Amino acid sequence: MAEISADLVYEVLRSVQHDISQIKGEVRDVKIELNAIRGHLISVQQDIHNIYGILGRHDARFEHIERRLDLNETPPLSA
């Protein structure tokens, strides 16, 4: 059986350490991108919330206009 020297172990450990440091850097990049995506999603949610608010106000205004003009979608009941 071949004898394992300390130099060989150190070389393998250095290679593993280098790989781990690369992985840490890539994970850091992924976290940055994930935070950017999270920020965009929050912006989209706020925009949708604002749109719903605007649509609600328009709906209320249309109902008010319909009442003032006496416009009804349902036909009157006949006697």
Image (tube, grey):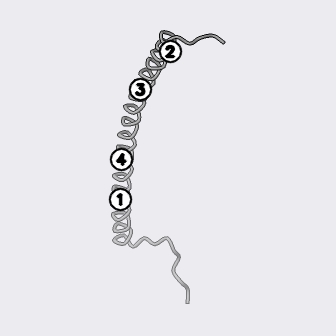
Would you place residue 55 above or below residue 64 in this image? above
Q: Earlier in the sequence, mark 4 or mark 2?
A: 2
Residue at the disc numbered 3:
24
Q: Earlier in the sequence, mark 2 or mark 1?
A: 2
Residue at the disc numbered 4:
47
Assess disc 2: are there few (<14), some (14-19) or many (≥20) residues with their C-alpha within 10 Å of its C-alpha: few
Secondary structure beneath label 3: helix
Return the x and y of residue 75 as percentages of the image width and height.
53, 76
Number of dots carrying numbers: 4
Q: Earlier in the sequence, mark 4 or mark 3?
A: 3
Marking on residue 58: 1
Is 13 positioned to the left or the right of 1 in the image?
left
Is 42 positioned to the left or the right of 78 in the image?
left
Secondary structure beneath label 4: helix
Return the x and y of residue 74 as percentages of the image width and height.
51, 74
Q: Nearer the viewer, residue 29 or 49?
A: 29
Real-space Cα separation, disc 4 to disc 1, in angstroms: 16 Å
CB under 8 Å between discs 4 and 3: no
Residue found 51% across the figure and 80% down from its top = 76
- Front tag of 3 and 2: 2
Residue at the disc numbered 2:
9
Quarter of the image containing the N terminus? top right
Would you place residue 77 above or below residue 35 in this image? below
- Front tag of 4 and 3: 3
Secondary structure beneath label 2: helix
Assess disc 1: are there few (<14), some (14-19) or many (≥20) residues with their C-alpha within 10 Å of its C-alpha: few
- Front tag of 2 and 1: 2
Quarter of the image containing the C terminus? bottom right
Q: Amino acid at mark 4?
A: Asp
Would you place residue 41 above or below residue 20 in this image? below
Residue found 39% across the figure and 73% down from its top = 70
Real-space Cα separation, disc 4 to disc 2, in angstroms: 57 Å
